[in-house]
Image (cartoon, rainbow, N blue to C red):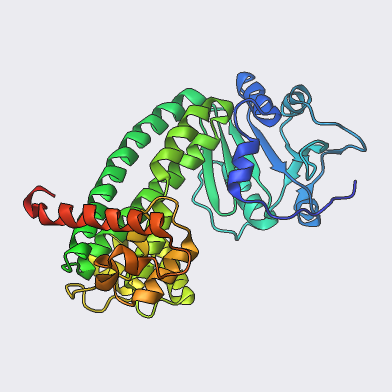
């Protein structure tokens, strides 16, 4: 039967299609209940065909969980169509390139990883001895754990993320006070960037785990969205405030550099400073005001940009009187009063700030 090549999909999309409650997950659960192993190539291409030997090829075999589970009782592997709605072959012997490196020890898992690398398709290996299904795709290996196991792990990770978010909020509050007082240094800025990136990374781990929960992860999505809200914006505005010159290309390069840091490098202040272009970690820095102005309710980004360009320095902006603010295009009396009240509040907070309690 002819094969149809498909576009490579992100692994999160694949995990979503394998989540509890989906037809494919029902099929995998049936196979596990049978206490049988299986090897499934989820997609078709000429490369898959070239790495397949023998087996039974079907002209028209619609996928159903029951049908797939029955075919898995045979020793060989199974090939599905690109949309996973058709079963193309069963009892197939897969022969991927043996030179492809793999750390797997079992023959089924070794074959699965090599097939995933060689074909670029998602491959699922069901272990009859360990009663677990494992996805190999895009250089990654993901165990499709039972929902109860995943939920317990997700709840623990959410607690950790909550603590990390509170540490990030504390670091940002400290930066607020130091910027307003003219005492900010690059070390304080780096601390905010470190914690923001750590929160983002932990959030992505939880996101992947939550996708595997399917419909049972709805409450987790709400909690996760709340904990991650504004984190990437905070990172970007902090960089825009303190990188010189603050070109879009420089901001983009700094963000990519942060994302590419290893976990160990992210913990190192000097490594983070180097990747975002801060030469003197203990040197003083003055913001442009992007991040603090973003906290003014319903202030459009375009108006923020005009304020920053008009006043040129953060100190002038911070102490500007309402009538001076009103001269900026887009700032009326009401908005000028709102901005002035916001700056007055943080100036008062800075006066009463105790660094020993932060």
Of residues 219 and 62, the one drawn nearer to the viewer in this rendering? 219
The picture quadrant where one finds residue 308 is: bottom left
Residue 298 as seen in the image, left or right of residue 92: left
* Residue visible at 33% across and 56% down in the picture: 337
When the figure is inspected, residue 145 is found, relative to residue 188, above or below; the finding is above
- Tell me if residue 130 can be seen: no
Residue 295 as seen in the image, left or right of residue 122: left
Residue 287 location (% of width, % of height): 29, 70
When the figure is inspected, residue 123 is found, relative to residue 286, above or below; the finding is above
Residue 350 as seen in the image, left or right of residue 102: left
The picture quadrant where one finds residue 265 is: bottom left
The picture quadrant where one finds residue 99 is: bottom right
Residue 75 location (% of width, % of height): 71, 32
When the figure is inspected, residue 123 is found, relative to residue 296, above or below; the finding is above
* Residue visible at 80% across and 31% down in the picture: 63
When the figure is inspected, residue 264 is found, relative to residue 312, above or below; the finding is above
* Farthest top residue in view: 33
Of residues 251 and 340, the one drawn nearer to the viewer in this rendering? 340
Residue 205 location (% of width, % of height): 44, 44
Residue 334 as seen in the image, left or right of residue 12: left
* Residue visible at 62% across and 24% down in the picture: 29
- Tell me if residue 123 can be seen: yes
Of residues 94 and 232, the one drawn nearer to the viewer in this rendering? 232
Residue 332 location (% of width, % of height): 43, 60
* Marker count (numbered): 0
* Residue visible at 34% across and 53% down in the picture: 338
């Amino acid at each position: 039967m002819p094969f149809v090549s498909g576009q490579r999909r992100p692994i999160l999309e694949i995990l979503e299609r394998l989540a509890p409650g989906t037809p494919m997950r029902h099929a995998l659960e049936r196979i596990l209940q049978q206490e049988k192993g299986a090897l499934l190539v989820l997609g078709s291409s000429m490369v898959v065909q070239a790495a397949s030997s023998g087996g039974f090829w079907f002209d028209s075999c619609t996928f159903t969980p029951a049908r797939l589970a029955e075919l898995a009782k045979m020793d060989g592997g199974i090939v599905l169509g690109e949309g996973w709605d058709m079963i193309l072959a069963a009892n197939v012997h897969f022969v991927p390139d043996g030179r492809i490196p793999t750390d797997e020890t079992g023959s089924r898992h070794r074959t699965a990883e090599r097939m995933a690398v060689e074909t670029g398709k998602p491959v699922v290996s069901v272990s009859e001895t360990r009663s677990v299904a494992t996805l190999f795709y895009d250089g990654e290996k993901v165990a499709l754990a039972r929902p109860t196991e995943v939920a317990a792990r997700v709840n623990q990770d959410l607690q950790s993320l909550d603590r990390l978010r509170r540490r990030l909020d504390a670091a940002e509050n400290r930066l607020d006070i130091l910027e307003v007082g003219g005492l900010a240094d690059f070390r304080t800025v780096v601390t905010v960037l470190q914690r923001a990136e750590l929160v983002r990374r932990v959030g992505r781990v939880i996101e992947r785990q939550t996708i595997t929960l399917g419909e049972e992860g709805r409450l987790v999505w709400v909690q996760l969205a709340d904990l991650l809200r504004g984190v990437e914006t905070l990172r970007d505005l902090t960089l825009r405030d303190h990188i010189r010159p603050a070109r879009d290309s420089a901001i983009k390069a700094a963000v990519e550099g942060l994302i590419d840091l290893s976990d160990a490098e992210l913990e190192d202040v000097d490594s983070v400073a180097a990747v975002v272009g801060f030469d003197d970690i203990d040197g003083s820095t003055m913001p442009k005001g992007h991040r603090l102005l973003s906290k003014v309710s319903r202030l459009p980004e375009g108006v923020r940009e005009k304020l920053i360009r008009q006043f040129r320095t953060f100190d002038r902006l911070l102490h500007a009187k309402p009538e001076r603010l009103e001269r900026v295009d887009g700032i009326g009396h009401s908005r000028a009063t709102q901005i002035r009240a916001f700056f007055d509040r943080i100036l008062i907070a800075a006066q009463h700030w105790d660094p020993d309690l932060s």
